[in-house]
């Protein structure tokens, strides 16, 4: 089973639409993982029919048990994040300010402080309307640790793909170069970079490729909206050649992208005659490399 991760340095390049189109193409051969957990959206197109949901716990926060607290104030004096304060003589932790360092827990003389793990989100194992399994998740508002949730989604998806004897695990990664992207890339066999012919698209492509190179994963690139700036498109192609990144496809700007998303469809469902040949060609090129 081969793991293919689709990422883009910049948001709004059409990455998720392309991932959904490939999911449509390989619906009998792949399990899909939506690892863009900060802004998951594949479920809007793949409409999961049924799902098994599990809570995701990560990180700790301090809480003070009033009955056991002697109001000595030691915890407030050591908290470097000013998360503990006295209110009407009682010491309380502001959960939004607590960084979970556990210093207060270690030094409290009466054992009044506990540091329970936090429920920061949920992940789901679902049957998509296309028939393939979709593993997706969401992080609670303001919650951290999206990288850990991505790792969880990936490990569940890997297990699922092996259990279903699928050829591919298709991963929709997060935009940017931060922790969730690093977690998406970990263990991948191949990466598809989606960019657009704009200054920011090109700049973010270079940044994300610098990251991918550290993982030593071979890559290919899809230039979306390739016709909006032919000069930058040419510069991108020169860069791909220099960096030995396979130029997988150039897609001209198309209203089908926003139209398909607003209708909850894949690109193939939006316009079969245009998109199927394009994605079949891409799919064959990827399979050949694999
Ligand atoms: S260190 Fe412990 S006993 Fe002292 S104020 Fe904090 S919670 Fe209360
Ligand atoms: S766990 Fe750390 S950050 Fe949170 S209240 Fe205690 S000392 Fe402050």
Image (tube, rainbow, N blue to C red):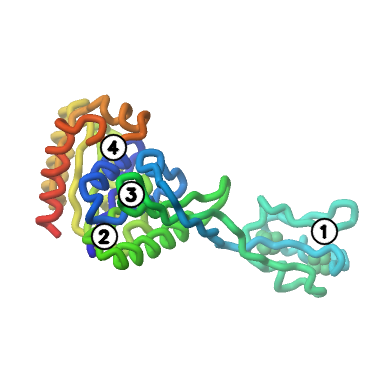
Q: Which residue is more in the foreground, 259 or 290?
A: 259
Along the viewing direction, whichever of 186 and 164 lies nearer the viewer: 164
Task: Judge whether residue 232 can be spotted in this image.
Answer: no
Mark 4, secondary structure of its residue: loop
Q: Is mark 1 within 8 Å of ligand 1?
A: yes
Q: Nearer the viewer, mark 3 or mark 1?
A: 3
Q: Nearer the viewer, residue 200 or 43?
A: 43
Q: Where is residue 105 drawn, in percent x and y?
A: 71, 69
The residue at the point 42 percent across, 56 percent down is 125
Q: Earlier in the sequence, mark 1 or mark 2?
A: 2
Residue of label 3? 172
Which is more N-terminal, label 1 or label 4? 1
Which residue is label 4 attached to?
Answer: 266
- Mark 4 is surrounded, within 10 Å at the Cα level, by few (under 14), some (14 to 19) or many (20 or more) other residues, namely many
Residue 207 visible, this angle: yes
Does residue 245 appear to the left or right of 140 in the view shown? Answer: left
Q: Secondary structure at mark 3?
A: strand
Q: Which mark is residue 237?
A: none
Mark pair 1, 2: CA separation: 50 Å
Image side of residue 24 versus residue 120, left or right: left
Q: Horizontal and vertical percent for residue 102?
A: 66, 67
Name the residue beneath numbered marker 2. 3
Where is the N terminus found, in terms of image quarters? bottom left
Graded by Cα atoms within 10 Å as few (under 14), some (14 to 19) or many (20 or more), the crowding at tag 3 reads many
In depth, the one of 163 and 121 nearer the eye is 163
Rounded to the nearest angstrom, the CA distance separating label 3 from label 4 is 14 Å
């Amino acid at each position: 089973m081969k793991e293919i991760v689709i990422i883009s340095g910049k948001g709004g390049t059409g990455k998720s639409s392309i991932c959904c189109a490939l999911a449509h193409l390989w619906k009998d051969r792949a399990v899909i993982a939506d690892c863009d957990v900060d802004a998951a959206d594949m479920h809007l197109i793949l409409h999961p029919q049924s799902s098994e949901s599990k809570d995701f716990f990560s990180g700790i926060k301090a809480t003070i048990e009033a009955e056991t607290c002697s109001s000595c104030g030691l915890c407030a004096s050591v908290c470097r994040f000013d998360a503990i304060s006295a209110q009407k003589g009682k010491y309380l932790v502001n959960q939004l300010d607590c960084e979970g360092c556990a210093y207060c827990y270690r030094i409290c003389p009466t054992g009044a402080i506990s540091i329970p793990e936090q429920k920061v989100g949920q992940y789901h194992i679902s049957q998509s309307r296309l028939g393939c399994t979709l593993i997706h998740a969401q992080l609670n508002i303001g919650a951290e640790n999206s990288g850990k949730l991505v790792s969880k989604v990936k490990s569940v998806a890997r297990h699922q793909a092996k259990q279903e004897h699928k050829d591919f695990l298709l991963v929709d990664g997060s935009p940017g170069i931060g922790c969730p992207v690093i977690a998406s890339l970990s263990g991948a066999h191949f990466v598809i970079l989606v960019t657009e012919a704009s200054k920011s698209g090109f700049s973010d492509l270079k940044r994300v490729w610098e990251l991918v190179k550290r993982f030593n994963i071979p890559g290919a690139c899809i230039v979306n909206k390739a016709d909006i700036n032919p000069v930058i498109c040419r510069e991108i192609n020169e860069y791909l050649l220099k960096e030995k990144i396979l130029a997988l496809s150039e897609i001209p700007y198309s209203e089908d992208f926003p139209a398909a998303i607003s209708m909850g469809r894949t690109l193939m469902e939006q316009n079969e005659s245009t998109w199927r040949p394009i994605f079949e060609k891409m799919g064959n090129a990827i399979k050949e490399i694999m």
